Image (cartoon, rainbow, N blue to C red):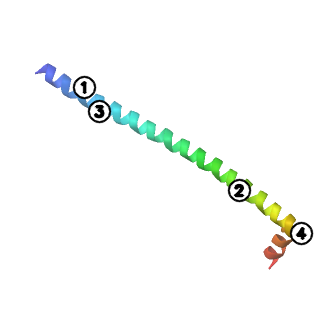
Amino acid sequence: MRKAFHAFFNFFATLFVAANRGASTLDNYAKWAEAESGAFELEARLERDARLAALSKELGIDLKVVEAKSAAA
């Protein structure tokens, strides 16, 4: 009977440890995904700014003046 109780509680302890490790893994993946999305957002913003600068140079428009006028309106 004692071995049965030991096996029963050992089963639940093992199950808890496995669930805890799984939750820890998911947390690590979530942190990694947040870091990747932040890096992707920064890269996309830099590419957008570069395209806008090239377009404004091509059109001969100063974007800062346009932004200031639209903010004042």
Q: Residue 10 carries which label?
A: 1
Frontmost residue, 38 versus 16? 38
Tell me which residue sits at (74%, 54%) in the image: 46
Specify few, some or many for label 2: CA neighbours under 10 Å numbering under 14, 14-19, or 20 or more.
Answer: few
Q: Mark 3 points at which residue?
A: 15
What's under tag 4, amino acid-wise? Answer: Gly
* Mark 3 → mark 1, Cα distance in angstroms: 8 Å
**19 left or right of 57 in image:** left
* Mark 1 → mark 4, Cα distance in angstroms: 74 Å
Earlier sequence position, callout 4 versus callout 2: 2
Earlier sequence position, callout 1 versus callout 2: 1
Tag 3's secondary structure? helix
Tag 1's secondary structure? helix
* Mark 1 → mark 2, Cα distance in angstroms: 52 Å
Q: Mark 4 points at which residue?
A: 60
* Mark 2 → mark 3, Cα distance in angstroms: 45 Å
Earlier sequence position, callout 3 versus callout 4: 3
Residue 17 % position (x, y): 34, 30
Q: Mark 2 points at which residue?
A: 45
Specify few, some or many for label 4: CA neighbours under 10 Å numbering under 14, 14-19, or 20 or more.
Answer: few
Q: So how many labels did they put on this image?
A: 4
What's under tag 3, amino acid-wise? Answer: Leu
Work out whether 12 lies above or below 43.
above
